[in-house]
Image (tube, rainbow, N blue to C red):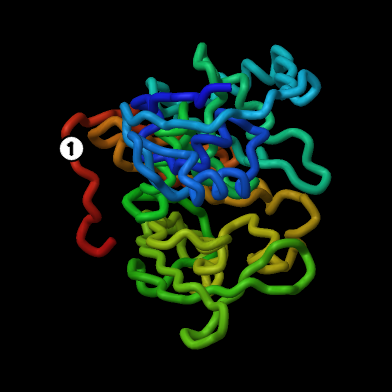
Amino acid sequence: MNNELSTVSADEAEIRLDRWLRRRFPKLSQGQIQKWCRTGQLRVDGRRVEAGTRLKPGQAVRLPPLPPVHPTSRVTPAPPLDRATQAALEAMVLYCDEAVIALAKPAGLPVQGGAGITRHLDAWLDGLRFGAPERPRLVHRLDRETSGVMILARGPGAAAKLAQVFRSRMVKKVYWSVVWGRPEPFAGEIDLPLVRSNGSGGERVKPASQDEPKAAPARTHYRTLDTVGQRFAWLELSPLTGRTHQLRVHCAALGVPILGDALYGPREDPLGRRMREGSSLGDLPNRLHLHARRLVLPHPLGGVLELEAELPPHMQKTFHLLGFKAPPAAPPRRLDGARCDPEPGW
């Protein structure tokens, strides 16, 4: 059998060689790929390479003879979604182009599966192909009860570039929350490391000292947009790091826990009623009031993408009851030739 020669497409730019191979040949093991690299059987543009080499458009990848694939080893396509799920999924779409899909994720929808979770976004992504040969890919996450803007990549090259953008902290994130009380001062930065907690009640984190082992740096900018006396405040939160439950723990540490936060919020509201039993807080919905309002990030094909999502229904109701006036979400914009440099203070 002759060696196989494949060309890297423009959409596969910057993806690692080993990931590129496993996407094309799912049965290849990492050990086999590394062996081919060590022995020089796997080459890019005629040169020996490492498994982690980043590919460029137009490069020729030479593969050694591949073992035949048994018919029973082929991947079974996912069954089509029912009409109601497909319609709900398409209603989430804020923006779509050849490289990116942006969604307005509703509160309560898990991004990925887990113990006891059968309905989640990752299981539905085949419903967002829109004619593309592959399903879109997740490049970041939102907590189950957090609503707002989420980005999907429509190919491996876009996924690699977007993953790097999120790792390098070039994404400007703005969240809105409603909190108990009002912060003092009204604006500032929370610089408080976090560490995972082994307590009961699922995945949790807690504040840590700077020198505590395994503590991760965590920083959040915040400012107060409106208040209802001393009881409630509408905050704008901009995380500078991406730790698990960062905004929820930082708000609680500031003395203004997020409304409806069953993990980090108070057990009783100011009137002494229980909060963790699913009942409403008077007329206020007892759900997490945290919303990913805005994302600004470099587009994988150039320029800058600006996205905003409307508040979820339970936060719209709370805003109405408390008298907060939220402007409508701006239409999505892709600014060709623009840069996404960090702003002063980010």
The image shows residue 333 at horizontal and vertical percentages of 29, 29
Residue 343 visible? The answer is yes
Residue 149 visible? The answer is no
User: Along the line of sight, which residue is nearer the eye, 300 or 97?
Assistant: 300
Image: 125 above or below 140: above
Residue at figure coordinates x 49%, y 76% from the top left = 193
User: Along the line of sight, which residue is nearer the eye, 160 or 184?
Assistant: 160
The image shows residue 206 at horizontal and vertical percentages of 60, 74
Q: Is residue 198 left or right of residue 178?
A: right
Q: Is residue 41 left or right of residue 157?
A: right
Q: Quadrant of residue 239?
A: bottom left
Could you tell me how many numbered marks the image carries? Answer: 1
The image shows residue 133 at horizontal and vertical percentages of 53, 17
Residue at figure coordinates x 44%, y 26% from the top left = 94
What secondary structure is found at the residue carrying circle 1?
loop
Residue ranking furthest to the bottom: 211
Image: 74 above or below 230: above
Q: Quadrant of residue 28?
A: top right
Q: Amino acid at mark 1?
A: Ala
Q: Residues within 10 Å of mark 1 (few under 14, many from 20)?
A: few
Q: Is residue 313 left or right of residue 96?
A: right
On the image, numbered disc 1 is attached to which residue? 338
The image shows residue 163 at horizontal and vertical percentages of 43, 45
Quadrant in which the N terminus appears: top right
